[in-house]
Amino acid sequence: MIDINYSLRSAYFSALNHCVAGVPAFYQAVPGNQSPDQYIVFRSISSTDSSTCNTSDTETQITVEIHTFTDGTNSGLQADLVAREVFNRVLPNPSGILTIDGAQIVSTRLLNDVVQDAVSEGNRVYVSRYLTFGHKIFHRSDIS
């Protein structure tokens, strides 16, 4: 088995960064010098070995967080629109674009989709949505 975490992070960043105009993506957290009103954070990569005698495989999960902040009210619509584009880019379909170096994503499925209740802080209203994807990944030995 090879370590594919960096390849997976790179694929997610390429697929999700500005997938919706003005919505940046970050790994782990938003840098302290930035404060976007809408953004994506992907993190919590975890893998379980599912190799066979003949293959090197993992069941790998990753969490994608969508955060939106607005003044006044926040219906959650923007989080839903961003989630729609995340689904288009991550889940297998004709426009799905996730490919990783050194491995092949054999299957992908949505394991969990949680919309947090809106949180008010002063006049700002925060809505967050958490998506957890599961990937069956076949590891090859030709990682660059």
Image (cartoon, rainbow, N blue to C red):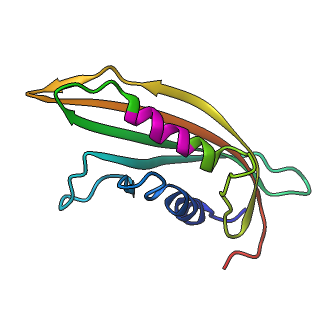
Residue nearer the viewer, 142 or 17: 17
Q: To which quarter of the image does residue 101 belong?
A: bottom right
Q: What's the magenta region?
A: 78-86
Residue name at image x 39 percent, y 30 percent: 77
Residue name at image x 46 percent, y 37 percent: 81
Residue 62 can be seen in this image: no
Q: Residue furthest right?
A: 54
Q: Residue 121 vs residue 50: left or right?
A: left
Compared with residue 122, is residue 23 higher up or lower down, i.e. above or below? below
Main SS, magenta region, reads helix
Q: To which quarter of the image does residue 78 belong?
A: top left
Residue 83 can be seen in this image: yes
Q: Residue furthest bottom?
A: 144
- Quarter of the picture containing the C terminus is bottom right
Residue nearer the viewer, 135 or 82: 82
* Location of residue 25 in the rendering, given as x and y in whole percent from the top left corner: 40, 55
* Location of residue 12 in the rendering, given as x and y in whole percent from the top left corner: 54, 57
Residue name at image x 42 percent, y 40 percent: 65
Q: Residue 9 vs residue 69: left or right?
A: right
Residue nearer the viewer, 1 or 4: 4
Q: To which quarter of the image does residue 50 belong?
A: top right
Confirm whether the magenta stretch covers residue 83.
yes
Residue nearer the viewer, 55 or 13: 13
Q: Residue furthest top?
A: 117
Residue name at image x 42 percent, y 25 percent: 115
